Image (cartoon, grey):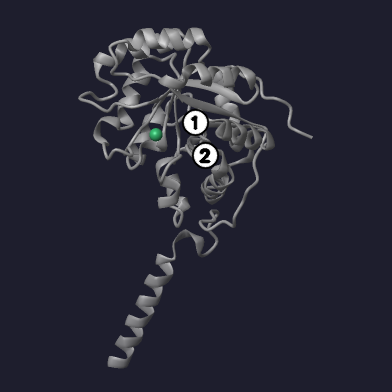
Amino acid sequence: MKKQLNLLLASGVLALLVSCAGPTSGNSEFNNDPPENYSVPGFIIDAHIHYRATDEWEKSFIETFTEYNAMGCVMVRMPDLERGIAFAKANPDRVIPYAMINIDSVTVLDDIRKAHAMGYKGLGELFAKNEWNYDDPKYDPVWALAEELKMPIGPHTGNLGSGEMARLRPSFLATIAVKFPNLYIVGGHFGNPWYAEAGEAARRNKNLYFDISGSSLIKKEGNPGIWREYLWWTPYVGKTTAHMPKDLVPAFEKLVFATDEGPDAFKENIRRFNRLLDANNVSAESREKIYGLTMAKIHGITPPAPKK
Ligand SMILES: [Zn+2]
């Protein structure tokens, strides 16, 4: 009897161990531990990369982005606006210049108009770092002007290098997306760690996207299938189903590729991002959008022919 019980317990433990191995075991349609993959579509837009006003950085950026037939939404600090726009104008097929306006500055509206007149195409990276959440009505004139000037915004979401988090939650971007339906919003970092919130905000708002740069893909390196818990609705696209917006797009198409690191880390960012795409069986058609065509559409850019 005791022996039988032990056997029963042992098999129970075994069954538990097998079930803990997760969806990679058995005949799952998903592959939660894909091999390293560096392949990319023929055209890329990095939605979030920070400019450094040095010859060295500019050289490295151009070399890398030319190699990948890529463009970058290059985020330029206010003191570097002149040099940044000169760099952008010298490399129009590589640089989409963004101005890092301070949304709490008393001159913010003038700053936006000035950046727009200089040739800046977007506003970011933005930070709600003081006493107000992104969707505080205090900021409405900023979002209204960005919408009027057709300048997409790139607000940081989730935890910040400074340690602040709470005012940068992704749900605040949903409020802005509803109030300003013609403003494109590409939140940084997929709301880390509020991924579920970011996913739902994006599902319900067609003008809201996220990049997933930063520490998230590093944190979830061992569990890349987890992203389909937050980006879950692809099977419902095109079906008349309750609780789904009419213009639903495949869930992973609410993401855009971004590095938020130097050009030397471009290749590693591709590996990390492909791990997410591969583990979640994201289609080739979606990958083209995620890697570049979505941002191209947002900015009215015709993608260049792939390099030979
Ligand atoms: Zn950021």
Q: Is residue 84 left or right of residue 170?
A: right
Which amino acid type is marked by label 2?
Gly
Judging by the rendered image, the residue that carries numbered circle 1 is 52
User: Secondary structure beneath disc 1?
Assistant: loop
Question: Which x, y percent locates residue 57?
Answer: 55, 34
Q: Is residue 160 left or right of residue 274?
A: left
Question: Which x, y percent locates residue 10?
Answer: 36, 82
Residue 106, label in figure: none
Q: Quadrant of residue 222?
A: bottom left
Q: In which quarter of the image is residue 264?
A: top right
**Residue at point 56% right, 22% down?**
96
Question: Which x, y percent locates residue 136?
Answer: 24, 19
Judging by the rendered image, the residue that carries numbered circle 2 is 262
Looking at the rendering, in which quadrant would you find the C terminus? top right
**Residue 264 visible in the shown view:** yes
For ligand 1, which image quadrant applies? top left
Q: Is residue 221 above or below residue 143?
A: below
Question: Is 289 or 17 nearer to us in this picture?
Answer: 289
Which amino acid type is marked by label 1?
Arg
Q: In this view, does 241 lie above or below 5?
A: above
